[in-house]
Amino acid sequence: MRQPGLRARIDRRRFLTSLPLFAGAGLALASSLRPRSVRADDAPSDIVTVPIPGSIAPGQHWVDVNLSQQVACAMSGGDIIRVVLVTTGMPGWETPQGQFRILYRVADETMTSAGIGIPIDSPDGYDLDHVLYTQYFTYEGHALHDNYWRPLSVFGHTPTSHGCVGMVEGDAFYMWNWVGVGDLVNIHA
């Protein structure tokens, strides 16, 4: 078990520019490349910091979502394995904060706004076919999933969803294979 208050940190700028891109916007780190510390002069926005819950066991697979930085991290125990650029809930439709568990998964589905109480024909309505790799972490419809209908420019920058954690298809597929039903999704600002 980890001690409460431990954090994993990584230099986002160095991480996103010095390693090859794998499967979309996410990146994989070899264990020898995982930094254990960062320079004090790095700008805070360039550092991805992950609070490690005290209940995390070594090697446990889980996902951390940082709403302020619009990133999700595939975690193994206290190690950052992959950083994924995401788009989360826009104002009025914020992604909930807290610790959640993956409740159920749908590999390929149609998502409609009617499922969260928004008429499909309203200005905020939607009816989307083939949303891939959806992993629900609340019964209100919040999930990790592919977000093919948004431009790449929003990922890592702009909250645009109705509360979900959206990512490019390759990253959604990676997370689909990284975590499953019962695994932790830790969401914070």
Image (cartoon, rainbow, N blue to C red):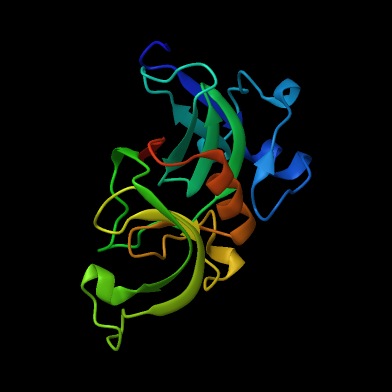
Q: Position of residue 129 (x, y in %)?
A: 48, 77
Residue 14 is left or right of residue 55, and the answer is right
Does any portion of residue 136 appear in the rendered image?
Answer: no
- Asked whether 5 or 78 is in front, the reply is 78
- Asked whether 27 or 14 is in front, the reply is 27
Residue 4 is left or right of residue 79, and the answer is left
- Asked whether 12 or 142 is in front, the reply is 142
Q: Position of residue 97 (x, y in %)?
A: 29, 43
Where is residue 1, by image quadrant?
A: top left
Q: Position of residue 29 (x, y in %)?
A: 70, 33
- Asked whether 46 or 50 is in front, the reply is 50
Q: Can you name the residue that lies furthest to the bottom here?
A: 121
Q: Can you name the residue that lies furthest to the left here?
A: 117
Residue located at (38% from left, 57% from top): 164
Residue 115 is left or right of residue 179, and the answer is left
Q: Which quadrant would the C terminus be assigned to in this image?
A: top left
- Count of numbered tags: 0
Residue located at (33% from left, 55% from top): 142
Say above or below: 110 vs 94. Answer: below
Say above or below: 91 vs 54. Answer: below
Q: Position of residue 48 (x, y in %)?
A: 53, 35
Does any portion of residue 77 appear in the rendered image?
Answer: yes
Residue located at (28% from left, 48% from top): 96
Say above or below: 68 vs 132. Answer: above
Say above or below: 17 vs 5. Answer: below
